[in-house]
Image (cartoon, rainbow, N blue to C red):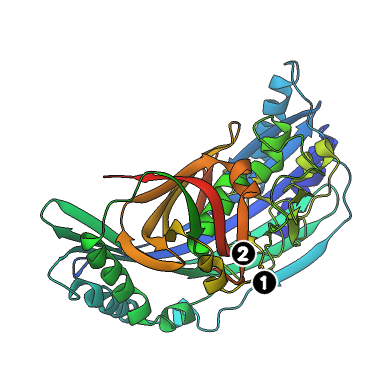
């Protein structure tokens, strides 16, 4: 495969490309789905092929093929060149990247227990055990869903800088969703595990902290109250904080949105964007679900400091955005597969630790809301507006947790919220494994935070 990629890159340069990149992708995946005590589906698949990207006459061209033969990949190359030439006469900013140092490396992430060494019957049995614990927790549990996914991916990138890197990565994910019902009231509990790992991740799952916890949350929420509405002091746990830093701020720090005029922090480098208590990192070197060594442009991944004690100090960059914005490519461009071009993606994004205990974060709150567990979030990056839906909450009165709350959401303006952070705990947890969607592509990410206190946050939700 290396010879084929090298051949195509040289062919592209001879054909007039100022930059050429060939990327081989292979993914072997297996899935198991359990629903209400029944193994509903088992499937497996292999996806592989080559994507070719070029710059010709100052424009990007991209094409891909599922057939990794010389003739097919060469045809993809000429399709990419043709695509670039077809838009070269159009007005618009030209594609531009600066030369990079040559990198040659091979990385193999090894599982402690390969999923291939575990029988399919054993995997199904384990998923049924996890699901049964939730289903039999209470008569109020109405639906239970457990899903298992194992993936082994290989990415090989060669470009006209001479870079040739290969990375093989096993990933394992398990999700549990529990639906409870009482009358017309329906609630849910959710737990997930996911990491760069093999089947050892499954063996380490403690049912009482996983599916039983999801069931307990779903059932207890049936007796919870709807949230108050208004502006409150809000304390968030690491999951809600992780949801906020990923959705509300992380996307705004992506360099392609910055130079595309779609970010609220596009002109704020070196400026205060948050309280001094706030430091934000995106770190692909942490061994969590967003971990990798090289991005899909062949750039070595390093920790990215985005906000340092309230000051915006950097963006997430691809080769192109680093060139356009005067930054340094630090390994933030990834593609879902060979059919997609690399775009800027977060990895493991989190708020850094403070110096307080959770008790100290809570103790000064006279009246407020504590939020725990994430459900979903979204942001309008150009407007800086966010919404984060928590799994559950509690009223805070004089520093103590009180009435249990369901269907709680917070919303507001991202930069206002960051400037109103008033306390940050010592404890940081990064345990939000998932897939982030952007521009039609999904990518492995993780997120987390300490316990954090925000002043003046709008609280609402379903009544």
Residue under pointer 2 = 424
SS class, disc 2: strand
Quarter holding the C terminus is top left
Where residue 97 sits in the image (x, y, percent)?
83, 39
Q: Residues within 10 Å of mark 1 (few under 14, many from 20)?
A: some
Residue 439 lies left or right of residue 84; in this view the side is: left
The location of residue 220, given as percent across then percent down, is 25, 67
Q: Are marks 2 and 1 in contact (CB under 8 Å)?
A: yes
Q: Residues within 10 Å of mark 2 (few under 14, many from 20)?
A: many
Which quarter of the image is occupied by the N terminus?
bottom right
> Nearest the camera: 437 or 79?
437
**x then y, percent, for residue 127:** 31, 75
Q: Which secondary structure lies at badge 1?
A: loop
Residue 179 in the figure: left or right of residue 417: left
Disc 2 or 1, which lies upstream in sequence? 1
Task: Determine whether 99 is above or below 82 in the image.
Answer: below
Residue at x 58%, y 63% (from the top left corner): 449
Between 454 and 86, the one nearer to me in the picture: 454
Q: Does residue 386 appear in the picture of this structure? A: no
According to the image, label 1 marks what residue? 355
> Does any portion of residue 293 appear in the rendered image?
yes
Residue 333 vertical placement versus 13 (above, below): below
For residue 159, the mark is none
Q: Is residue 302 left or right of residue 45?
A: right
């Amino acid at each position: 495969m290396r010879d084929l990629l090298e051949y195509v890159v040289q062919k592209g340069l001879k054909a007039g490309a100022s930059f050429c990149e060939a990327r081989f992708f292979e993914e072997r995946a297996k899935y198991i789905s359990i629903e209400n005590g029944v193994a509903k589906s088992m499937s497996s698949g292999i996806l592989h092929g080559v994507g070719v990207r070029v710059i010709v006459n100052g424009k990007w061209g991209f094409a891909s093929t599922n057939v990794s033969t010389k003739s097919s990949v060469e045809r993809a190359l000429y399709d990419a060149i043709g695509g670039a030439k077809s838009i070269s006469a159009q007005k618009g900013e030209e594609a531009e990247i600066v030369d990079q140092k040559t990198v040659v490396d091979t990385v193999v992430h090894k599982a402690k227990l390969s999923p291939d060494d575990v029988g399919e019957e054993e995997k199904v049995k384990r998923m049924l055990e996890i699901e049964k614990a939730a289903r039999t927790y209470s008569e109020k549990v109405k639906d239970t869903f457990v899903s298992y996914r194992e993936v082994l991916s290989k990415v090989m990138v060669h470009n006209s800088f001479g870079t040739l890197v290969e990375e093989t990565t096993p990933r394992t994910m398990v999700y549990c969703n529990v639906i409870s019902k009482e009358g017309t009231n329906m609630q849910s509990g959710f737990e997930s595990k996911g990491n760069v790992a093999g089947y050892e991740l499954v063996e380490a799952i403690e049912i009482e902290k996983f599916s039983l916890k999801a069931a307990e949350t779903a059932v207890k929420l049936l007796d919870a109250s709807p949230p108050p509405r208004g502006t409150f002091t809000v304390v968030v746990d690491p999951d809600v904080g992780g949801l906020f830093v990923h959705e509300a701020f992380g996307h705004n720090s992506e360099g392609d949105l910055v130079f595309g005029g779609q970010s609220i922090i596009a002109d704020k480098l070196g400026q205060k964007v948050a309280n001094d208590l706030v430091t934000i990192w995106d770190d692909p070197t942490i061994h969590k679900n967003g971990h990798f060594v090289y991005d899909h442009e062949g750039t070595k991944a390093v920790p990215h400091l985005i906000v340092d004690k309230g000051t915006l100090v950097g963006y997430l960059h691809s080769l192109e955005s680093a060139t356009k914005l005067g930054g340094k490519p630090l390994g933030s461009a990834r593609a879902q597969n060979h059919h997609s071009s690399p775009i800027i993606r977060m990895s493991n994004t989190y708020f850094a630790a403070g110096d307080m205990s959770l008790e100290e974060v809570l103790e000064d709150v006279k009246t407020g809301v504590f939020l725990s567990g994430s459900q979903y979030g979204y942001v309008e990056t150009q407007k800086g507006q966010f919404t984060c839906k928590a799994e559950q909450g509690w009223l805070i009165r004089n520093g103590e947790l009180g009435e249990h709350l369901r269907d709680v959401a917070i919303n507001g303006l991202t930069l206002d919220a960051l400037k109103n952070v008033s306390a940050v705990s010592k404890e940081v947890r990064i345990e939000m494994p998932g897939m982030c969607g952007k521009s039609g592509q999904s990518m492995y990410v993780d997120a987390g935070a300490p316990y954090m206190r925000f002043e003046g946050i709008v609280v609402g939700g379903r009544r």
